[in-house]
Image (cartoon, rainbow, N blue to C red):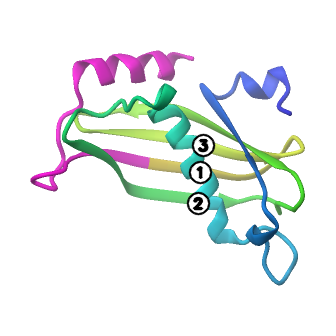
Amino acid sequence: MIGPELRARYADWACVTVRYGDTDRQGHVNNAVFSAFLEAGRVNMLFPGGAPLHAAGAAFVIARLVLDFKAELNWPGDVWIGTRVARIGRSSMTLEQAIYQDGVCAATAENVIVQMDETTRKAAPLREETIAALEVLRRR
């Protein structure tokens, strides 16, 4: 569980249960799984209630991901992923995330997400509604 002080640092939280298959030969969660946990946090925020913030005919894609490992994650248990909007651009946004287990920060990440037109495969401007929703999240 995430306490109120920690909860206030991020606009959105997702919880994922660590699976035994997420572990590696060293007995801790494999580094590649951290990216999947971050994805769960992003999806939770960018698809509230299952409805995407992106425009019809568009998709969100990762243009940049910087991931800093801070501590091990272990099985069994849950991890909590905090996500916040740091910046909003014309066709992109920068998200900051952190992964916690038992109140300990195991990783931090910065993601640049671009809205891509699915037909042209090029960056597409964010809709006004998307920007407004992201601004609400940014101010949280």
To which quarter of the image does residue 90 belong? top left
To which quarter of the image does residue 9 belong? top right
Which residue position holds label 1?
38
Nearer-the-camera pick, 92 or 55: 55
- Which label sits on residue 35? 2
Q: Quadrant of the C terminus?
A: top right
Residue at the spot 58% in from the left edge and 60% down from the top edge: 35
Quick check: is 50 in the magenta stretch? Answer: no
Nearer-the-camera pick, 90 or 123: 123
Can residue 73 be seen here? The reply is yes
Q: Is label 2 in contact with label 1 (beta carbons under 8 Å)?
A: yes
Assess disc 3: are there few (<14), some (14-19) or many (≥20) residues with their C-alpha within 10 Å of its C-alpha. Answer: many
- Which label sits on residue 97? 3
Distance from disc 3 to disc 1, alpha carbons, whole Å, reads 7 Å
- Horizontally, is 100 left or right of 58 in the view? right
Assess disc 2: are there few (<14), some (14-19) or many (≥20) residues with their C-alpha within 10 Å of its C-alpha. Answer: some
Nearer-the-camera pick, 118 or 128: 118
SS class of the residue under badge 2? helix
